[in-house]
Image: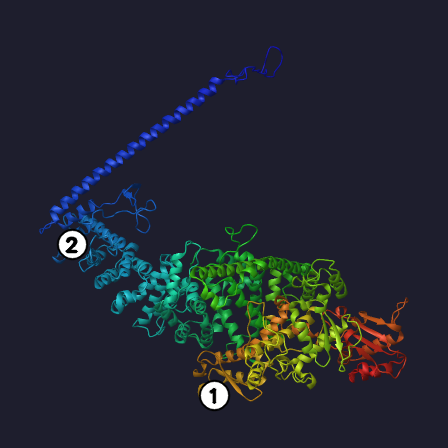
Amino acid sequence: MFTFNGSSRKPRVVNLSGRKSTVPPRGSKPSQSLSLANAQKERAEREAERRQLKAASNIQRVWRGRRVAGIQRAQWRREWDEEFGGEIKGSWIRGIALFIAFNQRGFVVRRDSKGRIGELGSGEGRDGSIKGAKGYRRERIQDPQDFERIKVLVSLVMDAIKNGDNMAGEDPKRSRYLLGQFAKLLVEALYDDPEGADLPGKAMSGDSVRNYSLRLLPWLAERLPTLVDAKYYQALSRVTTACEADLEALLRAVLTPLRSKNECTAVSYTVFAANYLITPGLPERLGAKGFCMLREGVDIEELFKAIEATPGAWLGAEVEGRLWLLAYIIDFLFASSSRKTIIDLRGDDRLRFNRDVEQQRVLSLLLASVSAEAGKRIDIEDMPMGQEEEEDSDEEDSTDIKSRPSKKQPLPPFIKSRLEGLVQQSSVSTVFSKTKYSDLNDAKIFAGFTLTLLLVFPRKSQDVRMWLCLAETSDGASAVRFLWEAVRRTNLYSGISRDYKVAVESLKRRNNSEDSMQTDDDEEWNLILLFVELYGFLLMVMDDDEFFAGRGIKDRQLPLKEVGEMSVFLKSMTFAMYWEGGEIIGEDKSRTSGGEIYFKDQNSKGWSVDYLRAQATALLKQLYTRDSRRQFLPKGHWLMTNHFDMEGFIPSVVQEEENRHRMEADDEDVEEEDERELDPAALAAMNPIERRNLRWERKKRSQRKKQRYNYLAAIAPRLEILKNLPFFIPFATRVQIFRQFVSVDQKRRRGGFVDPDQWRAAVLSRSRRGTIPRQDEALDGHDMLSRHHATIHRNRVFEDAYKQFWPLGERLKEPIQITFVDQFGTEEAGIDGGGVTKEFLTGVCGEAFTPAAAGDRNADDDDDDDIDDDHLEPGEPEGSSGYSIRPKLGKNLFLENEQHLLYPNPTSIEVLKEELATINYPDLDKGIRRLLRRYEFLGRVVGKCLYEGILVDVAFAGFFLLRWSQQASATASVGVNDLRDLDEDLYRGLVNLKNYNGDVEADFALNFTITSRLPSQKTITIELKPGGEKIPVTNTNKLEYIHLVSRYRLSGQAYEQTAAFLKGLNSIIQPSWLSMFNQSELQTLVGGDINTPIDVEDLRRNTIYGGVYQIGDDGKEHPSVQLFWEVMRELDDFERRKVLKFVTSVARAPLLGFGILRPKFSIRDAGEDQSRLCSASTCVNLLKMPRYKDFKILKEKLLYSVNSNAGFDLS
């Protein structure tokens, strides 16, 4: 701003009146801004007024039009009644034209329940209904008398037809148009009002509008093919459901479009399948005769073509409708006069074969679309009527419809029977017998069909696999060979074998696809999965001789070179699913909130990625086990270290384990609150709403667990690989990881004080939080430590240990202290600095795992381990039993096989039952529980040894160790080869039975039962499957028999004993830690490495010396010590192991070398007497050796001591 005084600033306006000045500041332009605002306001008011006037004009115009139209329609109704209301009728063309005129479609007035005018709307929706506001419905027929007028018109048209009228009239085009409009009006009338609910005072009868319409519809559908659309069959479906119609007329209306051979036939079959064959209960609604007429009137070939060509039409139906569609299709095939069984592929002509392939594809598509629903409901039994009513009332009481879970109902009997008809040996074998070995397309179609059967009928999966193992293609190829060759020709096989990322991208596309149709990749994945399932089953019943000979049952085994190629493919595929599992499943962004990550639900294409991963993992483990028993693949073949940064692998795994532990700890309180185990009485006492809420809570908890599992798998891929595919990582690395896990757990539990003495001092002073478990926080430090101290009699180590340490549970992880009492009742002097604990643990194992000695206790101490002198049940008063009996619960808990390998005694429970029955013991269950507690305690002891790194001289059977490693894995299986460790004779017998070429049923007379003999010579017979006593073993089912016998002997017979032992073991060592090792590796972990020679130099570097032998300032060893190491170098490995066992009680070296041996290997002088023998204190790994001066004498005395098993007494 420019002024003449030279200042550019605005002058300040001072107002002394106290009121706001209306005078604008100097230099402002109020007239411009105010005028602009006023002009805008006036313009907006004028525009609003114009809109209001225009809207009023539109309303008046529409209302006048509606009023005039109403008057005109009323006039047309009067004309129609004058012309057609009497006995003499006018022309049907005029009648239809007038009727359509006063019922024409267009803008309609919608009224609410009180008759008030609502919104205006027009047009038809996709399903034929009128679009408009929610809560209003179009009154298609305003006058109830219009229904009577329809009957008159239908009669006129039918009379004209009977009289030979060609229905063309003077203007054929107009006549055809009027007929078409009238036909659509009839269809809409049937669709909107199938039960005649809007007909005042009308009782359903043969003269109903519905039956009149049904009589005319077939003629109209034949002459007007375009009439047959989705709405047509939807209307007929609703009429069928109402069960109030002329059955003959209804079936003519349904079948006429299908019998007409014209350009619209394919469309007719499409809409028929998608809209009528989804009607529930057609056999009951149409009756046996009517349903038979429907079945015979359908062209199976046309129907299959329509279903295959337009899957989008029927995939949009509800899953219940698709189940009925599938059941009707199967029923039509069953009843087809040209086929005796499902998809009977008899005949050699190529056209017929193509049709059969088409049928397989259609059945595969239909089965895949309902597999998840059918699989959940196929085994649900029908509920009693009372319970059903209760559930119904439950639903009525619910106020939250959306959040209420839908309870799965059993499949209708018709659907269930037709689906079960597919799972027959004749059906599966016949389908497979007509496929061709060289046809990849045949293989894909067959794989989709068979795989869906396996998913829908999980209880029949073993039967289906067995039938396939026995079937052959038309070329004479076995199922395994046929599928394997097909898999090798797929693009996925070659791509995944080269790069695992091919699997990641393909599975990610499959999982994220919302299209239910099968792509080329989907068909190839079906082929791969079916092969994995079938070959995995075959390996379970195939012995090693057949496997390594490259032959199997009827040459079903693959050559070893091809097995090696297969293992490369499986390694790459399974690695992709574990390493990139989170990326494959994909994060659900719509549900991820608050820092919690959710993963997408896997789509409904039949099977999930988790299922494929589990099956592939199981097969890969079987191949690895074969290679471990007898190597046929190159060294290092199974390692996948090139995909990892091995330098940082161990720290990364430990960090993943810490993250997982932290998450599980955060969820622990929630889980404890959620896990409400209710007995049947408590459930019965609940009202329906409480039971419904409990079901809903359990469902949500299950979903939450699944989501958490997916999340943990995504954030800890290394742990998942170690748990499921540990052989991808070197054994030594896994041992280091195991020791790291234990070390971290010790630090966490003990508040950072890993050393036992430091931990005890911290407990006494409570100097740091976390040194005392939560269960013992209320205890005084001395009371806490007293619970970890035990006085043990040397003549009953196991029973004393059990009674004093059983209450600790998982707190046995903490350091314990032992005071031994000799045979005279005197406490042995000494302080437990770790060596006594080691002697105690090895002593418990030595006593409990020795079958012959487990019950050979001194007679004087019998009363101390009687069954009633035991820990009381929770809430049981002391002295409540009042029995004093002799059965020994700790006797023969484990047995030895011919190789002196230990496994749980499978008859221990039955033996105990016999003993308790002889003395009339009142509570057998209590006695069994107390026996199982001893198994559980033994599991804790073995876990304690693993936890502390103490090696014990105990060797377990391979099949028993397999149960250790399979606990945390998603796959668990035992095969006939594992039976070799249990019963060599039984194994040989089953192998001979499998290879027997004669008539098994006639020559052996076996059935599906198995007999066990107790020590008392009493026999117990068990059925291997329901009704097994009446099922003979034949050449067809002998594979199933072999599998069931193996599974019972290895898993079922000693299930309770094994489960109790593993429960105790898992309380000390997490199952996921054990799953990092196979059977032989676990044995090495327990007892040391027996295959690796003793490394003398490693032992020498990690030996400490005491007394005179202590190394001085010069750093040189004592001359006697130098002689000792010269002797050790000269001894062979067998003699070195003897020396090692003499000193440490174990003949095997620690897995990671002698540097981790606790206590350290020690040598101390024992005087200068050259005639004195060496002695040892195994509790502290101490060798007491005199100061020998001659090499020959030292070697002689050392070996004499070792071979004499010398101890303190030979010092």
Answer with mark 1 or mark 2, whichever residue precedes in sequence: 2
Instruction: Reply above or below: 620 against 1169.
Output: above
Q: How far across and down, in percent of the image, does residue 963 sit? A: 59, 73
Instruction: Reply above or below: 853 against 749.
Output: below
Q: How far across and down, in percent of the image, does residue 1152 sit? A: 73, 69
- What is the secondary structure assignment of the residue under circle 2? helix
Q: How far across and down, in percent of the image, does residue 869 sit? A: 64, 78
At 39% from the left and 25% from the top, the residue drawn is 43
Binning the other alpha carbons within 10 Å of mark 2 as few (below 14), some (14 to 19) or many (20 upward) gives many
Residue 1004 — which label? 1
In what quadrant of the picture does the C terminus appear?
bottom right
Left or right: 879, with 104 as reference point: right
Q: Which residue is mark 2?
A: 157
Q: Nearer the viewer, residue 96 or 1060?
A: 1060
Res 290 quadrant in image: bottom left
**Colour scheme in the image?**
rainbow
Q: Nearer the viewer, residue 52 or 482?
A: 52
Q: Nearer the viewer, residue 26 or 225?
A: 26
Instruction: Reply above or below: 15 against 972.
Output: above
Res 1026 quadrant in image: bottom left
Q: Amino acid at mark 1?
A: Phe
- What is the secondary structure assignment of the residue under circle 1? helix
Left or right: 991, with 646 as reference point: left
Residue 632 seen? no
Label count reads 2
In what quadrant of the picture does the N terminus appear?
top right
Binning the other alpha carbons within 10 Å of mark 1 as few (below 14), some (14 to 19) or many (20 upward) gives few
Q: Amino acid at mark 2?
A: Val
Q: Is the Cβ of the residue at disc 1 closer than 8 Å to that at disc 2?
A: no
Q: Nearer the viewer, residue 672 or 614?
A: 672
Q: How far across and down, in percent of the image, does residue 761 sit? A: 76, 63
